Amino acid sequence: MRMCVLVMVLGAGCGRLGFDTPAGPAGMTPGGDDSPPGMPVNLQPQVCGAQMYSTIDLSKAVDLSIAEVPGGAAVFAIASMGGPLAGFTVDVDGNLTRPLRTVVPGTFSASAAAYVDSTLITAAVSSSQTLVQIVPADLSSYSQIANVEGEYVSKQALVHASADRVTPTVCSAGLTVNPFDPAWKPMASQLSVTTAQSTGIAATAVGSEALVAFSTEDATATPKKDTCYVEQLATQATGFGSSQPFACAAPRLANDGTTSSRLVFAAPDGVRTAGVAVDQLDPTTALVAPGATAPRIVFDGQHYWTSYRDATGTIVVGVTSGAAFLTTPIAGVAPTTDATYELAMIGGAPWVFAVEAGGVSAHKLCLGN
């Protein structure tokens, strides 16, 4: 079995690594009530704008990732079955501003992106390695800044852990924190949590810190042991967290601007959700959609938006509005795989991008009566 090559940071003053016994917030209902006091309730999610990029052929793409940038977004994909990282850009209305082009040559299986400190960052996974790059706004070139161990990288390719910039990855050894100095030079990787084989990772900002969720499975245990972990990274070497004895495959995280966050994940019976209070994962999960896969979640400043592929393969978007969880299917959108669609915030609005047989589609979402 491959193991990550890492440097452990130990000793007094480094803080506490590992996991507490979780207390967890109260059990949740699907959606819950996340509307601030005085906000309108029971508003239905709607498609309020759409684009189709028929000239962008990503029909053989295996993965999609999006970074919101000033004036729009950069959209990245692995261009073919085990191929280079390609990308294009759009404005806040979804209009194409730069056509598809190869951004990072190579043979990759998964991608990630982020816009942090006025810098566009991409990451691409090749076997057990994650390559991290700085990409200019016009996607014309790239500068590789790291090549780290990691079979899985968060779709949010880089996050702040207080003053530190880090790319979280997971592999057969556990959670790795890969930091960068102010000049974007890689520093020694830190093994934050040692676990069994990891199967996916997500990250989001919580104030100035980062929250990471990842799932593991121990096939050597009888019965097989699954665990879902959350870790709040205060710095590159300081973390506090918790775990629960269930798998959280294909995890995604969002934070509401306070100490409360929301985890969505794929479970054997469909898409489920759980709350995270600071670094404490709720032991109670709620079924969002039976038979669904490919969960996504974002927070727009007022509401959590959740999307998934239902049992028929249709993309469904749901939003918490008052005490209700209201959903709308995006009719006719048929992403080629679970990995070839994304939910992202662009210009203050949630958008769904999907790789389809006829090109790439984009749908802007809003709330209405």
Image (cartoon, rainbow, N blue to C red):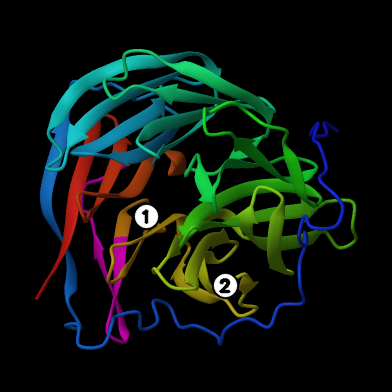
- Magenta stretch? 317-334
Q: Which mark is residue 312?
A: 1
Asked which secondary structure carries label 1, the reply is loop
203 or 288, which is in the foreground? 203
- Residue drawn at 78 percent across, 41 percent down: 172
Q: Label 2 to label 1, Cα distance in Å?
A: 35 Å
Q: Residues within 10 Å of mark 1 (few under 14, many from 20)?
A: few
Label 2–label 1 contact, CB within 8 A: no
Q: Position of residue 12 (x, y in %)?
A: 85, 57
Identify whether 78 is placed above or below 336.
Answer: above
Q: Which mark is residue 278?
A: 2
Amino acid bearing label 1? Thr
Q: Is residue 318 left or right of residue 259?
A: left
Quarter residue 325 falls in: bottom left
Q: Position of residue 123 (x, y in %)?
A: 51, 30
Q: Is residue 322 magenta?
A: yes
Q: Dominant secondary structure of the magenta stretch?
A: strand
- Residue drawn at 28 percent across, 66 percent down: 301
